[in-house]
Amino acid sequence: MIGIVGYGTQIPRYRITVEEIAKVWGADAPSYKKGLNLNEKSVPAPDEDSATLAVNAARNALIRANVNSKELGAIYVGSESHPYAVKPTGTIVSEALGCSPHVHTADLEFACKAGTEGMFIALHLVKSGVVNYALGIGADTSQGAPGDALEYSAAAGAAAYVMGRDNLVAELLDTHCYMTDTPDFWRREHAHYPEHGGRFTGEPAYMKHVSGAVKAILDKTGMKPEDFDYMVFHQPNGKFPVQMALKLGFKEPQFKHGLLTPTLGNTYSGSSPLGLAATLDIAQANQTILVISYGSGAGSDAFIFRTTNRLLEVQNLVPKIRTQLDEQKMYIEYGAYTKFRRKILKPE
Amino acid sequence: MEVAKHWREAPERYRLEASKCNKCGKILFPSRLICPQCDCEEFTKINLSGKGTLVTYTIIRTAPPGFGDLAPYAVGIIELEEKIRILAQITDCNPDTLNIGDKVISKFRRMSEDGKTGMIYYSYKFVPDVGV
Amino acid sequence: MRDVAIIGIGMTKFGELWEKSLRDIAVEAALKCMKDAGTKRIDSITIGCMSSGLFNGQEHLASMISDYLGNKHTPATRVESACASGGLAVRTAFMEVASGMSEYALAIGVEKMNDVSGDKATEALATAADGDYEAFHGINFPGLYALMAKAHMHKYGTTRDQLSQVAVKNHHNGSLNPHAQFPMEITKNTVTGSARVADPLYLFDCSPVTDGGAAVLLTTVEEARKLGKQPIVVISGIGVATDTIQLCQRKDILTLEAVKLAGERALKMAGKTIRDIDFAEVHDCFTIAEIMVMEALGIVEPGQGGPATESGLTALDGKFPINPSGGLKSKGHPVGATGVAQICEAVTQLRGEAGKRQINNAKTALTQNMGGSGGSCVIHILEVK
């Protein structure tokens, strides 16, 4: 048996609304809100980045896991906004958690699925017997170009998963990965903001890979959509994952707990990992959860988990997602937002 | 470019690593070579809990170089559970709403950087303990 | 130990001295001092300067200043204790004479702060705090003293008005001092109408950035008599103490332990109590500092510094005048020079030469010079022999 021993998250406290952004660019807020099913997004404070979010999420995960950081055999940090272009985030996280030096660490990138990649590798490394516990983290503080559609949704957050063999809160039933070379969204080196293929990002990209991964894992396991208690899709906005889920035969009660984008935004590598965490926060024992991530470029990782009794013992040990999303929010205006996100800078 | 100086401080800044005197139990943050209470020179490393109370604070409005973008921000002296005190920024808050006596907890945050191409410095900061 | 007298004092104007370099300022103060003493003999030079390295890119002041003072190959030493460097220089000169090492010992305090930008000056001053555990976290000196001010207001009920009164009083005194950088009267509204620096402190709670130099010449009382000096002003007590460099590690952040101990040591050496002191020059780097120093020295009970200032205890015509020179606030604070300038004011008062700011019947003085947020303190007791 392998699976999740503990999970933890960190969402910034600052928020900016769709109205606030639309006001500046003379855009129609109601149509963005409707079109994206999105009201507001998280904004990282000037002193937050993917490394800090990863560390704070990992600390929460270790508390739920009740595992000493020195027992971690591997740490993987997936992000598309690593603080350095060259210098691992993983080593900073390891040092902050007190894991070094006898630990395997790597930084991962695959657009928005870098987080689940880390989870995939951590799970299978534990399965192979090479390590007892491994940590997979998805953390991002991605940027959207000013006035672009992505500016409304590009948000920040992190989720961390301690994988192991004992004291599981959720057992792993199966995984599957579905990947092709599809140029829907990219960023060249030295470019400050990413570019995307407009409507091409829908069917040939997100839809194709998510449904491809779903079909493959359902075939593999002989399971059907109605067999799952919950499902979590990668959620770049509040629309795509809902359309996708309904089309594939899932119902609203299954995905509503894991759909965070409407008040969080797209946390990129944190997207489906945070959706899973929100689901774990409210799940009962012995419930099945399907998780499908998506990363542009493109690919999807699929996971099926089944919760255990122990989940109920750990849910309340650290702040839950709903608490972080619904309470203690601090709203900022566009001026503060551009300063926080370093879109405007004082001269050196 | 002061790489070694900052790297050396990682245990304290990243993990609130302190020393406990083997003879009298006094907790020292940062660590020292000789205990100011009993002159003992042997210590055990511990990690502080990061939970504490605000003893005093100020709101920096005219910031020192490198911190101008953050102003106004709060800096305070926090008394930790271990009964030792530490100076740190209080972040994730409207500084005007802070009060002496507030409960705070430590978080790993980005402190500053050596320009756009130099090293990034991480450290402890504290946030109001409001359950998130 | 031999008895030590101050036979000469000299100061430059304090302010933005654009036309004068570091060495110009140091030498000018020294030459004025020697003229005042009426002698050219110097057996040793001690220079108090916090950071000529960071402000001026220049170390090795021992050589440079001895050189530019006439290149007489004089033994010279530079001492540093942040803002207490000047006081420490006087103490070192005292020890030269008291021990018999020198007959005539010159102490020069100097700082040239305006050759670098405001930002670089702030960075240089920050080195008086703990670099890794204070400055790194984005706190500056106004911030450190603001932490004390807020706690002081919380515990003792010290008011914003009482802090402002310190600045108002010192500016009044400074308006009577020809060497002062800002010799103008102000009101409490001037203080709270100025820029907010670190709550609860405003710009006018803070001493300025200043260029300036001051010098004193010490010799034995016997030599002073031979030179016909009248009155003879002696240093009868010196006390130095250190405390934790980090503010948060003090036993009590509202007690300036270094000041308290230095005061006790100085008074003990002089065979006096604080009740015997007629007036004091103290280190008002920030308004709250003057209040806390009053309490540490035992001039008032802990927590009573604010009310005492408000009631006029420390005014020029009060029962215990503090900072008749205008203090660091109005006179200026060229860091290394301050400790020596305080001695110059004390001597001027004790000689009866302070003109419009003369304190009546001034016979015994205390000067208190402090480094950083209270990590070090040097106190001198001076009296008329």
Image: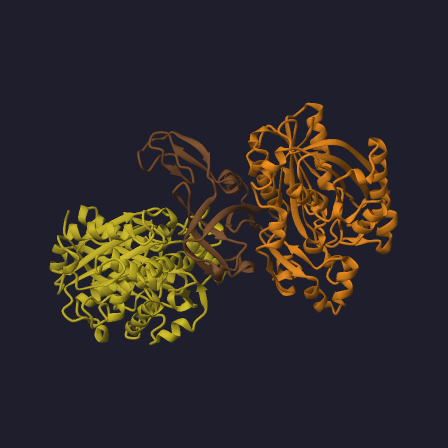
| Residue at the spot 56% in from the left edge and 40% down from the top edge | A317
- How many numbered marks appear? 0
Would residue C228 be seen by someone viewing this image from the given angle? yes
**For chain C, what colour was chosen?**
yellow
Height in image: C156 above or below A320? below
Which of the colour schemes (rainbow, by chain, secondary structure, one colour) is used? Answer: by chain
Q: Compare residues C203 and C210 and report the one nearer the observer.
A: C203
Height in image: C291 above or below A241? below
Chain in brown (letter)? B
Q: Compare residues A49 and C19 and report the one nearer the observer.
A: A49
Q: Quadrant of the C terminus of chain C?
A: bottom left
Height in image: A279 above or below A26? above
Q: Position of residue A285 (x, y in %)?
A: 66, 35
Would residue C45 be seen by someone viewing this image from the given angle? no
| Residue at the spot 70% in from the left edge and 42% down from the top edge | A276
**Residue C320 falls left or right of residue C340:** left
Height in image: C316 above or below C101? below
Q: Compare residues A93 and C52 and report the one nearer the observer.
A: A93
| Residue at the spot 85% in from the left edge and 36% down from the top edge | A216
Q: Position of residue A153 (x, y in %)?
A: 72, 56
Quadrant of res A100: top right
Q: Compare residues C200 and C174 and report the one nearer the observer.
A: C200
Q: Position of residue A287 (x, y in %)?
A: 71, 37
**Residue A204 falls left or right of residue B100:** right
**For chain A, what colour was chosen?**
orange
Q: Position of residue C372 (x, y in %)?
A: 36, 53
| Residue at the spot 75% in from the left edge and 45% down from the top edge | A254
Quadrant of res C346: bottom left
**Residue A253 falls left or right of residue B71:** right
